[in-house]
Image (cartoon, rainbow, N blue to C red):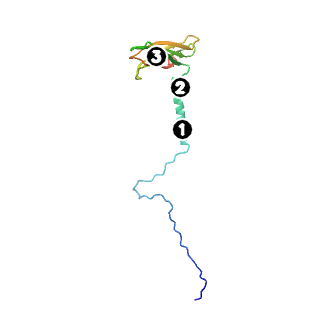
């Protein structure tokens, strides 16, 4: 047989992939309940919820401001005297509209923080004056260590 040039014909086998394409998990039917699709919600829903939360927060803030935050009626305790087991004398200054009046709530507390007295005090300013200093004897159920003027509001609101 004559030596002839051999032609090498090599066939390449078809490649088999090393990994398979990911598929959805296969569960035996009926074993794990039915598969549910994730719930979809509108994209605008979070924005609406944030807006509603802001509006409600502003409404609550306005309500508390109207009830407790009138800057025209501001009180400050200036002095505590005559402290006994049955009472304490408190002096406080109140800023209010010129010639106006107010109802102030005065509270006394014991060492433990427990409230031992609370009274409403009527305050009236002289015509043309907007600052009033009031001295009031507060009857207590024990020795008072702290006295606060919780709020002063126009008459009829408190």
Rendering coords of residue 114 (x, y %): 40, 22
Give the Cα distance between marks 1 and 2: 22 Å
The answer, for residue 87, to whether it is visible in the render is yes
**In the image, farthest residue toward the top:** 126
Check disc 2 and report the residue beneath it: 65
Going from N to C along the chain, the mark reached first, 1 or 2, is 1
Q: Is residue 115 left or right of residue 20?
A: left
Q: Is residue 141 left or right of residue 97?
A: left
Q: Tell me the number on the disc at residue 50.
A: 1
Q: Tell me the number on the disc at residue 120.
A: 3
Going from N to C along the chain, the mark reached first, 1 or 3, is 1
The answer, for residue 157, to whether it is visible in the render is no
Quarter holding residue 107: top left
Quarter holding residue 96: top right
Rendering coords of residue 123 (x, y %): 51, 13
Give the Cα distance between marks 3 and 2: 20 Å
């Amino acid at each position: 047989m004559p030596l002839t040039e051999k032609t090498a014909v090599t066939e390449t086998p078809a490649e088999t992939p090393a990994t398979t394409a990911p598929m959805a998990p296969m569960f035996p039917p009926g074993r794990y309940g039915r598969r549910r699709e994730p719930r979809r919600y509108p994209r605008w829903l979070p924005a609406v919820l944030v807006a509603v939360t802001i509006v409600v927060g502003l409404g609550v803030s306005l309500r508390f401001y109207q009830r407790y935050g009138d800057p025209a009626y501001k009180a400050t305790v200036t002095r505590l005297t005559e402290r006994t087991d049955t009472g304490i004398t408190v002096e406080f200054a109140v800023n209010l509209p010129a010639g106006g009046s107010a109802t102030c709530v005065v509270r006394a507390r014991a060492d433990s923080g427990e409230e031992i007295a609370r009274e409403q005090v009527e305050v009236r300013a002289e015509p043309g004056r907007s600052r009033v200093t009031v001295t009031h004897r507060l009857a207590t159920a024990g020795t008072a260590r702290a006295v606060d003027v919780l709020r002063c509001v126009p008459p009829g609101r408190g």
